[in-house]
Amino acid sequence: MIEKVYCAEVKPDMDGKKVRLAGWVYTNMRVGKKVFLWIRDSTGIVQTVVARGVVDEETFNTAKKLGRESSVIVEGIVKADERAPGGAEVHVERLQIIQAVSEFPIPENPEQASPELLLDLRHLHLRSPKVAAIMKVKATLMQAAREWLLQDGWYEVFPPILVTGAVEGGATLFKLKYFDRYAYLSQSAQLYLEAAIFGLEKVWSLTPSFRAEKSRTRRHLTEFWHLELEAAWMDLWDIMKVEEELVSYMVQRTLELRRKEIETFRDDLTTLKNTEPPFPRISYDEAIEILQSKGVNIEWGDDMGADEERILTQEFDRPFFVYGYPKHIKAFYMKEDPEDPRKVLAADMLAPEGYGEIIGGSQREEDWEKLRQRIIEEGMDPKDYEWYLDLRKYGSVPHSGFGLGLERLVAWILKLDHIRWATLFPRTPNRIYP
Ligand SMILES: NC(=O)C[C@H]([NH3+])C(=O)NS(=O)(=O)OC[C@H]1O[C@@H](n2cnc3c(N)ncnc32)[C@H](O)[C@@H]1O
Ligand SMILES: [Mg+2]
């Protein structure tokens, strides 16, 4: 029985061994009586050599014409050869064509294609090694998150996506017909996680969140993957410690397991290596002072957008926190700072190198009357939040939580020029196909 191996498993020390590979033609180059087929699979690329006289004439002639992304199964003998990528190649004895392709619509170097073409052909672009590398890093980040959450005693829960109220402002809700009434696509699982903590105390979820953001920026999607945690008995400072420990573990573990993939996107790993607790912490007041000292036209009480955050991140060589935002620029559920009623107990985590906000978090208002007042102040109807207010009627407790945008984390780690490359099929205001 000929052993099926992956491309990355073909090594010089297998010299003389007969193997079977299944994959897709990555490049096809004819040199005299030989055809050099680079075969790609999910692990990498290996050079195979189809030689006239070793295979029959029909196979040789077919091999000459095989276009990129033709699907094939090859059997042959491994030959150590330092000229071949990885130091070894496979001399083909049998070539089975699963499906021959003559013209693959994405150029050999996808970076020569326009972003719009790659997005129109995203279903085909996914197979490129660079896109596959992004998805491996994203998968490993979540593998690491699950490892950390399990060992730290957090329960995964599965909140609804069809909901009846806003969490992060009514302006970015997607509304849909729900039988004889309307519903919304979830902006954040937070309110449901808050209900779960009274039984499980420390909960987390990974869900798609939806924001009808009209802003066409490099860091906004209309659908993104949202890793959210909520914990009973924790205050803002407790949850910030959770955030930095979780993010540090995710980054270090992914550096350990996906260094090769990361290095195809960035040379300098310093900020990733620096991602260890404790992260620097600055107040919103200090952030405003820094921005003003750098000539930014911003006043206390203004929100910080992507541009301001980009400038602020120049001061740091690792993720950092900004805490103590003004109440009027933050969400209704955030607890007022008892030492300064102008502020709330909120903290964002910003990534360095210009990427800015990757986490939004806060301590929640646990007092029924105060929360109800905030709902009214925000122009919302307390009736729509009756169930949520109930959580403050029956054994309310101090509690805090946060949401991490997974694509934002990936975009920073791989220094992507747009968040859309961090998701399988990006959803933005002008793209919902394929
Ligand atoms: N459980 C919580 O406390 C989460 C809280 N309700 C919340 O949704 N906060 S957030 O709006 O800042 O969004 C959280 C993060 O979610 C990401 N986010 C937020 N909006 C987006 C868009 N539009 N595209 C991509 N990523 C986005 C970004 O990293 C934010 O820091
Ligand atoms: Mg935010």
Image (spheres, rainbow, N blue to C red):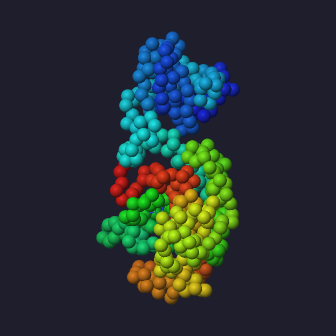
| 114 or 408, nearer to the observer | 114
Quarter the N terminus occupies = top right
Q: Position of residue 82 (x, y in %)?
A: 64, 25
Height in image: 327 above or below 33?
Answer: below
Q: Residue at x 62, y 63 (%)?
A: 316
User: Residue most toward the top?
Assistant: 53
Task: Count numbered badges in the picture.
Answer: 0
User: Dividing the picture into quarters, in which one does residue 18 lie?
Assistant: top right
Q: Is residue 37 left or right of residue 252?
A: left
| 278 or 137, nearer to the observer | 278
Q: Residue at x 49, y 74 (%)?
A: 298
Q: Position of residue 145 (x, y in %)?
A: 61, 58
Q: Residue at x 56, y 58 (%)?
A: 353
Q: Position of residue 418 (x, y in %)?
A: 46, 54
Q: Is residue 182 left or right of residue 156?
A: left
User: Residue most toward the left?
Assistant: 180
Q: Is residue 122 left or right of residue 90?
A: left
Q: Is residue 187 left or right of residue 229?
A: left
Height in image: 20 above or below 297?
Answer: above
Q: Is residue 102 visible?
A: yes
| 111 or 18, nearer to the observer | 111
| 331 or 316, nearer to the observer | 316
Q: Is residue 331 visible?
A: no
Height in image: 414 above or below 297?
Answer: above
Q: Residue at x 60, y 81 (%)?
A: 397
Q: Position of residue 7 (x, y in %)?
A: 58, 32
User: Dividing the picture into quarters, in which one does residue 215 lie?
Assistant: bottom left
